Amino acid sequence: MKKLVAAAWRLIRGPIQWRVLWIFQAKFMVGVTGIVRDEEGRVLLLRHRMWPEGRQWGLPTGYAIKGERFEETVVREVREETGLQVRVGDLAYLKSGYRLRVEVAYEAALIGGTLKIDSFEILEAKWFTPGDLPEGLQESHRLLILGEGD
């Protein structure tokens, strides 16, 4: 039986193989975070409207759109939420094992734009030094800022 399945698999090749895999494999959302720093080393934090009360401060974050590279997600999310332009740097964090999502974070550098928040999602945006982070900051984001992510 295994030989028959293997022979059939080799025959269907290409797009059909991908469709079969899509049906039988797990589907995940990918949450992408940008650790945006300015030339002074300060980090951009946003107070998110939709996040739990008392834990609303965090990094720019959003979900990847189908077909989008994760670096593009960082650029898009920062631009949509703040009007700022960033250049994406190194991968800082990757974690799987969640039931329905994967988390990815990248370092990013401010390269331009004017701060103008999206008031639907964001209550305020501020620059903070890593040594003076606000109360109500997501713990996982504090660890990313300090380079201590697990």
Image (tube, rainbow, N blue to C red):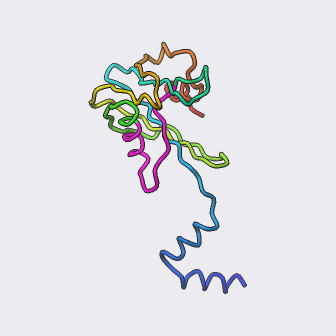
Q: Quadrant of the N terminus?
A: bottom right
Query: Could you say which quadrant of the image residue 37 lies in?
Result: top left
Residue appearing at x 37%, y 30% in the figure: 82
- Residue furthest to the front in view is 120
Residue 34 vs residue 93, the one in the foreground: 34
Is residue 114 one of those drawn in magenta? no
Quarter of the view holding residue 75: top left
**Is residue 47 shown above or below 30?**
above
> What residue lies at 61% left-to-right and 68% top-to-bottom?
23
The residue closer to the viewer here, 3 or 21, is: 21
Residue 8 lies, in percent from the top left, at 60, 84
- The magenta stretch spans residue 60: yes
Q: Residue furthest right?
A: 1
Residue 84 located left or right of residue 27: left
Q: Residue 49 vs residue 6: left or right? A: left
Q: Position of residue 7 (x, y in %)?
A: 61, 85
Tell me: residue 123, above or below residue 26.
above
Of residues 64 and 129, the one drawn nearer to the viewer in this rendering: 64
Displayed quadrant of residue 116: top left
**Residue reaching furthest to the top:** 132
Residue 17 placed where, x, y %? 54, 75
* Looking at the image, residue 67 lies above or below residue 37: below
Where the C terminus falls, by quadrant? top right
> Which region of the structure is painted magenta?
58-77
Residue 120 place in picture, x, y as percent: 45, 31
User: Residue at 39% across / 20% down in the picture?
Assistant: 42
Q: Nearer the viewer, residue 94 or 23?
A: 23
